[in-house]
Every structure is written in structure tokens, then in C-alpha cells.
Amino acid sequence: MKTIQFREAVCEAMSEEMQMRRDESIYLMGEEVAEYNGAYKASKGMLDEFGPKRVIDTPIAELGFAGIAVGSTMTGNRPIVEFMTFNFALVGIDQIINNAAKIRQMSGGQFKCPIVFRGPTASAGQLAATHSQAFESWYANTPGLKVIVPSNPYDAKGLLKAAIRDDDPVIFMESEQMYGDKGEVPEGEYVLPIGVADVKREGTDVTIVSFGKIIKEAYKAAEDLEKEGISCEIIDLRTVRPMDHDTILNSVKKTNRLVILEEAWPFGNVATEITYQVQFQAFDYLDAPIIKINTADTPAPYSPVLLEEWLPNSNDVVKAVKKVMYK
């Protein structure tokens, strides 16, 4: 095993897959991915290795280059599209929703759309209202799209390689605040299956489900709660769609309590879907109402004091766990 940063895991996944495709069908395009080595250095060295035909700097025109990439899949290519942030992807969302997600069905199966749209999601410090939004549930609402949100370098590399090999469009969501995170990654080849959650911490008293960078707050809370004799099981969803309901349900049947932590607005989010599925399929196992923890129901503030109040934190998780434990 080796220890690398999240950004390096992303770069290794893309580079290894591009090396394996001698037909040059895999290419990377996006703003600053080439000459600048990526806005967050997730494509560092790739221009030198693969050249300007496979690592392509684009204009600030997300709708245009998203459309070009989608069209190129119809001629046998497998593009990776980097958005500097998924907030900017709103400009190109028509291509993602109305073309990439629907090409296979609209063509009667004549065309596949093997494409990965990747980049940062959710908040990243003082970036204010228009640069701090989480869109996982938006894309997960769309049939035809797969949505992946890894929380560490190991998962990021293994899942990104799987996404690049997938014949359907994949939304791969990262975080600006995770690019410097370090973690162990195998020296050799490995690929993780899409749609399989991971139990990051075994526990007996309450299940906590989360994904992405906010799961770190669940880890902090679990450590604090352990000192008080409360055992938390933490599930990293990893893939939002398709969702691994079985892992969640099996855990809830063991702990009988569920808290869901998500960095998104409270209305109609991923936690809402999990809550529905658990109450529908495992209602008789619940010893307390499900609690979901989200951001405040407002646009993200710029003030660091207000931002701290807006975001969920480990104290919120501790309070929720104690509530479902009736303590």
C-alpha cells in the first residue's frame, strides 16, 4: 500500500485507464485541465504524458464542451469531462440530463454514452451562495445517470476507474476540501464496484449513513459517543445511484436506529429517499423515528460565523444519536 492525496488518486485513475486504451478513446477535457495541470491539480502531468489531443483545455463554456463530449461518445469515444465545480455544470446540465442520460433509450439501444462528468460538489469554505451547492440528489433523480460521491483516496481511485469503464454516463462528485486528504491506496490494479456501500465502522446501537466529505463529522461524533458507551455503525454510501439499500437495511435491522448525515438542503434530498426506503422495508425494526441532518434551508452564507452554523457538524450528529437513543 502507498499513501497518496485524493487529487493524486483521481489523477492515477484517469492516467491508468488512458494508458490501457491504446485506441485513444479515453480523453480528458475541461477548464484548465491541461496547461495548468487542473484547477486543483487533479490532472497534474497528464498533458505531458498524453498530449493535447487527449488532455484538452476548453473555453469557459460548459454547455458547449459537455455537448461535444456527449456527441463524441456516439463515435466510440469515452470522455472524462471535468467541471471546475458542479455549480458551473448548471450551465451544461441540459446536455447531461436531456442527452447523456437519455441517448441509450432514445436511440433504442443503438448508442451508448460512456462518459464521466467529474468535479467538486457542495461547500468549500467562503465561496458563498452560488459556489457552495450540493447537486447529488438532482442528478440522482434522473434515470440513466449513475452518481458517485467518494470520501477518501482509496474509494475515489477504485470507483473512478469503474466509472470510466462503465458504458453509461456517470456523475463523479468530489470536494475541493478533500483534494489534499491522504489515504492508503494499493500499489497494483484494483476497481471498486459501483452501487456498493461500505461499512466503515462496525457498531451495535445506531446506524449513521453518510457520504462525501461530510462523513468526517460522523467519524468524530462516533469517537465522542464511544466514550459514553454508545456504539455507532457508520455506512459510507459511496454511490448515491444506484443505491445500496441492502447494506443500510441490514444495519438498521441490527441497530434498530438510523441517523442520516448529508451536506445538502433538507427538502427532497438523498436522506429523504433513504428514510422512505427504510420505513417502507424495515419499519418494524425501528425503535425510534429516523433523523436526518442537513444544512440550513437557506443559500450558503459567506460569513464564516454563519457558514459554521449553516453546515452540519459532529455536535449535530451526537445530539441526533442521543435523541434516537432516548438519552
Image (cartoon, grey):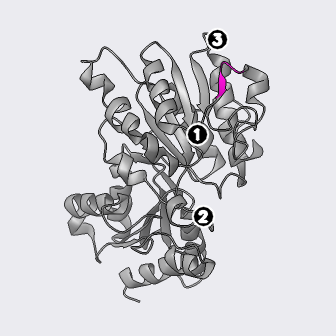
In the image, the segment drawn in magenta is: 52-56
Residue 21, above or below 251: above
Magenta span includes 93: no
Where on the picture, by quarter, is residue 303? bottom right
Q: Viewed as shown, does residue 3 lie left or right of 206?
A: right
Residue underneath mark 3? 22
The amino acid marked with disc number 2 is Leu
Where on the picture, by quarter, is residue 103? top left
* Label 2 with label 1: CB-CB less than 8 Å: no
The amino acid marked with disc number 1 is Ile
SS at mark 2 in the image: loop
Q: In front: 174, or 288?
A: 174
Image mark count? 3
Q: CA distance from mark 2 to mark 1?
A: 19 Å
Q: Earlier in the sequence, mark 2 or mark 1?
A: 1
Residue underneath mark 1? 60
